[in-house]
Image (cartoon, rainbow, N blue to C red):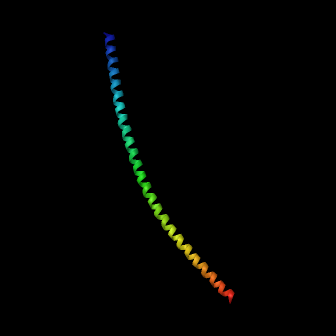
Amino acid sequence: MADELVDWFNKADATYRTDLLEVNELNFARFDAKVEQRFAEQDASLERHLGDFRAEMHEAMGRLETRLIRWMVGLWILGLGATVTLLKLWVE
């Protein structure tokens, strides 16, 4: 009788262990799928933000280039004016 009871407990324990293992595997699979989904969402969000950042930097570099060209032209005109003035003073 005692052996039968021990066998029954062992079978019940094995059944519960198998069920618990299956439940844990299903839970892990769900968790893994959620983590993958969140990584994919974060990756898409990061790509979108990087695209926006690149566009803003391209626009800012264009404005900077325009300002630098204006300064260069202004300095060339100033230098040319100074050179002409000095040549007039030297010739007289």
Q: For residue 24, what is the image quadrant?
A: top left
Specify the quadrant that holds the C terminus.
bottom right
Q: Quadrant of residue 84?
A: bottom right
Return the residue nearer the eye: 44 or 77.
77
What residue appears at the point 62 percent right and 81 percent down from the top-left corner? 82
Query: Where residue 8 sits: x, y (%)?
Result: 31, 16
- Residue 36 pos. (x, y %): 39, 41
For this view, does 53 lie left or right of residue 21? right
User: Is 53 on the left-hand or right-hand side of 71?
Assistant: left
Looking at the image, which is closer to me, 90 or 43? 90
Q: Is residue 4 above or below residue 44?
A: above
Q: Residue furthest front?
A: 91
Q: As rendered, which of 45 and 64 lies closer to the eye?
A: 64
Please give the name of the residue rendered at 39% of the width and 45% of the height, measured from the top-left corner.
Answer: 40
- Up-down: is 31 above or below 73? above
The structure residue drawn at horizontal position 42% and vertical position 58%, both measured from the top left corner, is: 52
Q: Is residue 1 left or right of residue 92?
A: left
- Check the image and name the residue furthest to the bottom: 92
Q: Quadrant of the N terminus?
A: top left
Measuring from the top left, give residue 68's x and y in whole percent.
54, 70
Q: Quarter-wise, where is residue 76 in the image?
A: bottom right
Number of numbered discs on residues = 0
